[in-house]
Image (cartoon, rainbow, N blue to C red):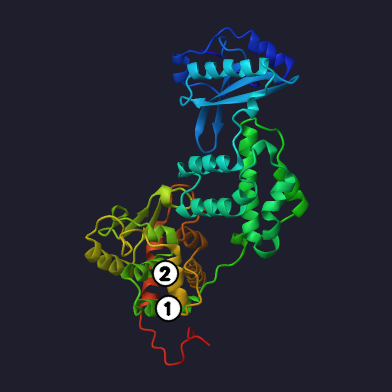
Amino acid sequence: MAIPQKGIYDNERTKKQMDTQKSNLTKTLLESPLEPGYYKDHEAPGLALRVQDTKTRGRTKSWVQRVEINGQETNLGHGCWPEVSLEEARRRVWDFLDEIAAGRDPRLKNVPTVREMFVRIIAERSESEKIWRSEGTRKRWRHNVDTHINPVIGHLKVTKVMSADILDCIRSLVGKHPETGRQVLSHLREMCRQVRAENLRGDDPTEVVAAALGPIHPRSRNRHTQALPYQQVAEALQRVRESGAHWSTKAVCEMMALTGARQNEVRGARWEEIDLDTATWTVPAHRAKESRTHRIPLSEPALAVLEDAWERTGGVGLVFPSAAGQSISNATVRKLLKTLWIPCRPHGFRASYRTFMHENGVPDEVAELALGHTHKGVPSGIDLLEERRTVAKQWGYYLTRDTGLDHPSPLSPA
C-alpha cells in the first residue's frame, strides 16, 4: 500500500519525501480504499493522486500535477478518478509538459468562460440532493446567472475577471433589490472558489467587492414570516374549503395547518409515506429540511383530508397532485391565500401552531419536535411521537370545532 504524503511539493522536505516514495500507482491501488493524502506516480513527472474528504461527495480521488511555469511552481488539475483514468491522466501530463517546453502556459489553453463555468457548477450541484434538494434553488441560480451575470461578464475567461467586473454585476441591485444583489455576489463567490480549487488563479476578486460594500442585506430568515393568530386559523381554513380552487391546493393548505409540516413536505407527499392504519406520516430524510426522517402524527381531521385525497388519486403517486398530475407549486398556494384576503404566508401556519402549543402549556421539546426541529434536551433517535399525537389531536379538534362567531370577521378586508 502506498504511503500518502500530506503535501505535494509545497516545501523541500515534502519534495524529498515524494521523490523517495518507492510505490507506484496501479489500477489495483486506485480501486482500493486510500487514506487522505497524495500518492505520487513515477511514470509521469509531477503527477500525483490527491485523496481528500469532502462534505458533499465523501472521499474523492483527483489528479494533480506539480510543474514550474515561468519560474513559479504551481499545481495543475487533471480531473477526478475514475472519470479520468490513470492512462488519461498520464497523457495529459505529457501534453502539458510539451506546452510548457514550447513556452506556452497550459492553464490558458482550456480556460472556461464565466458562462461555461456556471453551466458546469449548476449541473454538478443539481446531481446532488445534499446540496440542492429543491428545484427552486436551481431555478434561482439559473435566473440570477442568466439575468445579472452572463449579460455583463459571461463572455470573459474566469482568469480575466476583475473586482470591477464583479461590481458591475451587482451595482444596480444593491439599492433596488439588495437580496438579489446578495445572492448574485454569493453565486460569483462560489464560482471563484471553484476557479481557485482548479488552480486556474490564486486570488478571489469577490473578496475585495464584499469588503468594499459591507453587508448588503440581512438574510431572509431573520425576517418574521407573516402568520395568523391561531384563533383565526379555523376560519381561514373554512374560507379555503369554500373557495373555487383546485381540490389539491385546498387540501395542501389544510394539511399544512393541521400537521404543522413544511410546505414542500406537504406538496411532495407520496402515498408510500402515509400509513393510514397507524395514522402516521413518515417524511423521508431526503425530503426533510433537517435531512433526517420525520414522523408526523395524523389527527382525525388530517385523516379525513387524506381519505378524500385517496378517493381522488387511488392511493398512487403524489397525495396532492395538481390538475396536470405534477406537484403543485409554492406560488399556487401563496396566490390562493392572497386571493382570499387571508393575511398569511403558507409557512405562517407553522407559527400559528407553535403559538397554540406555547399558550396551552405544551413542553418546548414536544413543540419543537412537532415542527420537525431538533431539541438539545431530547436524545437523537427519540421523537416523542405519542406525546405529539396528543397535541395533534387537540389542535385538530380546535381547528374543526364550531366557532360560533357572531361578530364581523377579523379576516374581512378593510
Q: Amino acid at mark 2?
A: Ala
From the top left corner, tell me how far across and down residue 62 is, in percent: 54, 25
Q: How many marks?
A: 2
Give the labeled residue for mark 2. Answer: 257
From the top left corner, tell me how far across and down residue 290 is, in percent: 48, 51
Q: Is residue 38 above or below residue 374?
A: above
Numbered disc 2: secondary structure: helix
Give the labeled residue for mark 1. Answer: 236
Q: Is residue 99 above or below residue 52?
A: above
From the top left corner, tell me how far across and down residue 210 is, in percent: 72, 50
Q: Residue 259 vs residue 86: left or right? A: left
Q: Is residue 236 above or below residue 151?
A: below
Residue in the image at 60% along x and 9% along y: 21
Residue in the image at 43% along x and 50% along y: 382
Could you classify mark 2 by the number of other residues whose Cα lies within 10 Å: few (under 14), some (14-19), or many (20 or more)? many
Which quarter of the picture shows residue 265? bottom left
Q: Say which of 263 and 162 sits in front.
A: 162
Q: Is residue 179 above or below residue 62?
A: below
Numbered disc 1: secondary structure: helix
Residue 254 visible in the current orientation: yes
Q: Amino acid at mark 1?
A: Ala
Could you classify mark 1 by the number of other residues whose Cα lies within 10 Å: few (under 14), some (14-19), or many (20 or more)? many
| Residue contact at pointers 1 and 2, CB within 8 angstroms | yes
Residue in the image at 32% along x and 58% along y: 280
The CA distance from mark 1 to mark 2 is: 10 Å
Which quarter of the picture shows residue 77? top right
Q: Say which of 157 and 321 sits in front.
A: 157
